[in-house]
Amino acid sequence: MLLAIDVGNTNIVFALCEGDEIMHRWRISTDGQRTADEYAVWLHQLMALEGVAMGIVDSAIISTVVPPTLFNLQRLCRKYFNVEPLVVAVGQINMGLDIALPNPAEVGADRLVNAVAAHGEWPGDLIIIDFGTATTFDVVSADGAYQGGAIAPGINLSMDALYQAAAKLPRIAVEPPPGDLGAIGKGTVHAMQSGLFWGYVGLIEGLVARLSAELPSMPTVIATGGLATLFQRHTPAIAHVDGDLTIRGLIRLHILNAKQN
């Protein structure tokens, strides 16, 4: 069974996968100082709750955008699972994509993994939106070339910045104003909900339109990340939501590279 590890800026997802099916997944906050032993104790307890033995893991793959986490995650795989993990790194493994950029190594591993998964699932030109700590927009052409994209502050970052910098503004949830209220705020909370949520919808629609205008055909837009479903309900710019896109990309990369070894 494959242990797929996706390290984001806020959380790390551990997923147990059999073939192309995700059997179990667990999430922990990202901490570059957490040791391999700490990961092992935490994972052992969660796996035991699911009736899964640690010995069932026979391979592992790691994608990280937080370099300090890599050493201890590799050590976790070697010491407690007795496997050498495949690390997603441009130039070191077969990415399954042509990275059409001047400096491919500077692209975040998570963005490339998402691109691999989306290209394997949907035909044609693609735009992939990942709602994380930052919101990333990635473009993949129909022939499987990663073209680049855009990076915007995540909506939670924007909300926190507004709350922290303006003394009289409260902290609010990420949600549109109630259904009977329009975009014109009639109070502070309503105005903040309108500005944050509908402003972010405008950012999504505007960037999708600008990116699409630079492609030879109308792209399919796929979203992933915690807020993807919420935003899809409020904009026609997003065609599909796949909450497991990154893990599916890790599975594809593992299969692709295992065939070559």
Image: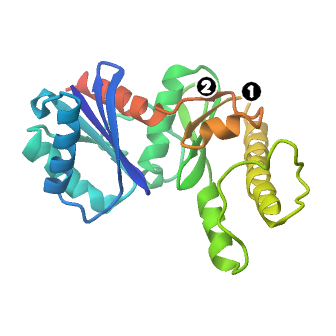
Residue at 40 percent of width and 33 percent of height: 247
Which residue was labeled with disc 2? 142
For the residue marked with disc 1, what is the amino acid? Ser
Q: Position of residue 180 (x, y in %)?
A: 87, 43
Q: Is residue 214 left or right of residue 248?
A: right
* Residue 231 x %, y %: 69, 40
At horizontal 74% and vertical 52% (from top left) the residue drawn is: 197
Residue, disc 1: 217
**Location of residue 87 (image quadrant):** top left
Q: Are marks 1 and 2 in contact (CB under 8 Å)?
A: yes
Measured in 3D between alpha carbons, the distance from the residue under mark 1 to the one under mark 2, in whole angstroms, is 9 Å
**Residue in view at x 88 percent, y 48 percent:** 181
Residue 128 in view here: no
Above or below residue 120? Residue 179 is below
One can see residue 248 in this view: yes
Q: Residue at x 19, y 26 (%)?
A: 261
Does residue 18 sit above or below 135 in this rendering? above
